[in-house]
Amino acid sequence: MSLFPSENQTSGKFPAQNKCINSSRYLALEAISKFSDTPHAENLIQEHLKTILKLLRDNDISIRRRALDILYIMCSPSTAPRIVEELLNYSDEPDLSIKEELVLKIAILAEKFADDLIWYIDVVVRLITNSGDYITEDIWYRIIQIITGFVGREPGQDLQKYAANKLFTALSLPNVHENVVKVGAYVLAEYGNFIANQPGKEPYKIFETLSRHWVSVSAATKGMLLNAYVKLAVNFPDLKDEIISVLEINSEHWDPDIQQRAVEYLQLLKEGGPIDPAYTAYVLAKMPAYSEDIQNNNPLLKRIYALKAGAKTNDPTVLNELKKVAEEELYKSRSYMTQGSVARDLNTIGRESVNLGEKSDSPSKSKPSAAVTTDLLGGDDDLLGPSTTESSQNIQSHPYYQYCKDKIAVGENLIPIPNKLQLPSSNPQDWKSLLITENGVIFQDNNVTVNYKSSFQGSMGKIAMQFASKGSSISNVVVTLPNTSNIFFNSSPVQYEGNPSLVINCINTGVGSETPTVNLTFDQGGSHRSVNFGLPVLANKWISAVDMPQQAFEKYYNEYTTANNPNYFRLDNFIKNPAPSNVPVSEVLKRLSSLLAKGLNLKVTNLPSDSDVQIVNGVGQYVMKSEGSQNPTNLPLLIQAEGFEQNKEYLRLSLRGAANKDVLKNLYQIITLIMSPQ
């Protein structure tokens, strides 16, 4: 007897009977879901696959939802092609929430069961072509990652050539969805050279095929098209003059982002321009394979249950994905927590100094000298407070030690308490604010105000500065910014439309503790002036947040606290509570939680709850990309802060990390500086 009753099993005269049938079907689907983790799952889904596929078109929305759940959680390598094909054809679903979930699940299943990556390309191109409105950024990001490949699992030129052919064909049609343009722009820019020798797909045809969609896409996608154009100009020199013309037109575009991209790309492409050709080659090189962390951290798996989970639920999709994601997070945590030590010569890479404002014919290859470097971090290691032994003894003698001694590290690799972070004498409060914000005034005196704007992601950063005169106009602006031991700088020339301004791009290549120093010279009122000021670009700018379950945090925090591992570093201290005694400790910790999340870009958890904070946990990774490396290196960070309601005078601040002593010291300095009373 079938699990699923049909309409002819009851009389059509009784509507209540039809409701009974729907209930029976729903319960049958529910029963099947219970077998999803058993050896019988494969046989069960094979036996009832045809019926479950038919139920995708049932009139009852709850049955349609549950049928989709069952197909997703019980899909197997043998059933995946048929299930995915049926889901692709299931495009007439009227309920928008199901449609969004449907598209997400197709993307996940295509990746999970893509033994043949050609099949994966076919599926996702159909998906973004036919259901573009439901393709969110995380879906097409993931498609690009898989086409590009992951370290140790690169897909090879044949797949990338197939993807380029497929997307060229899709883009050849009129009125394609904007998400097709996004993915196509990336793939043709990176791998268009694999198809450029085919009839009808010559370089100018690739450029023409992309350009025809310019007028119909948003400003964000226009930015991606400009990215594609500049890469095509490098890969196909015959296109260079035409693409330079397009960039010159868009250098006056009304949208500031498009205008800025066009100006910067023009500087990269112009021969004899201010940009070092080696830097141009570095910036426009083919995208490397993505790291193992990104491969294991599939954001679609998290979205699938975030989409459905709300209140407590027994939904099998939610329960199944919660279990999978928890396991995935534990795996990911282990993978980055146990990385090998970082090469110690990262801090001694010789870099050339970059002169931002005029071209240098013979750039220096040496490190910046002490005369032009301002150290705002409190000095050398031997000035950073007591020795490891003294530091351990001091904290153990603190009266608060008994409250939390099991959370304080002992043994080797204890970092001495660093000196206080020193602020510049000019504009100290604004500079302090810029340590944890993006916009503000970085320097001002009686002659000039320097406005500052920045953004950082991973190991890359962008800084814009504008120079506003306080008296007569300024001219002949030259900005010199030597590279530090771990930060490489490059810039567009100074622009003189309105107040002089420039944009600086930077790359973090290692672990360092120097504060970059800017030398600004300009002419004003017949005088030549020169000023120096530091850039607020410290360790926190290179941190990315990491999701980690509380159980995993406790496990790794304890491991980093107690294990005798030469790559584990620990810093503990009791810091003064900056608030008056009448302020609840919970409120102080809320402020600290906000600082860790917004100023240090950590993933923060407040315990036991956001309304009653007693402990703050923060997790992140310091991201750097060493010279010559295709993939970034991620150094793990754990920070925990604790308050004591029974005695409010001090807070415990504990930092843990691997192979990153200088990073931990710098973060401690930033936290204590911002938390200190004004």
Image (cartoon, grey):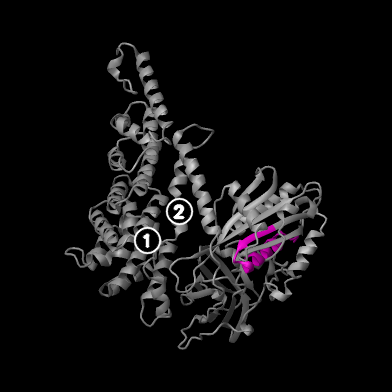
Q: Position of residue 13 (x, y in %)?
A: 30, 11
Image position of 658 with respect to 274: above or below: above
**Left or right: 393 with respect to 556?**
right
Counting residues from the start of the chain, the first of labels 1 and 2 encountered is 1
Front position in the image: 101 or 246: 101
Amino acid found under the numbered disc labelled 1: Met
Q: Decide whether residue 418 is among the magenta residues.
A: no
Main secondary structure type of the part rendered in magenta: helix
Q: Which residues are magenta?
A: 654-678
> Which element type, helix, strand or loop, lies under badge 1?
helix
Mark 2 neighbour class, 10 Å CA radius: few under 14, some 14 to 19, many 20 or more: some
Q: Decide whether residue 660 is among the magenta residues.
A: yes
Q: Residue furthest bottom?
A: 362
Image position of 548 with respect to 496: above or below: above
Which part of the image, by quadrant, shows the N terminus?
Answer: top left
Q: Residue furthest front?
A: 39
Amino acid found under the numbered disc labelled 2: Asn
The tag on residue 224 is 1
Residue at numbered disc 2: 296
Front position in the image: 315 or 504: 315
Image position of 82 with respect to 665: above or below: above
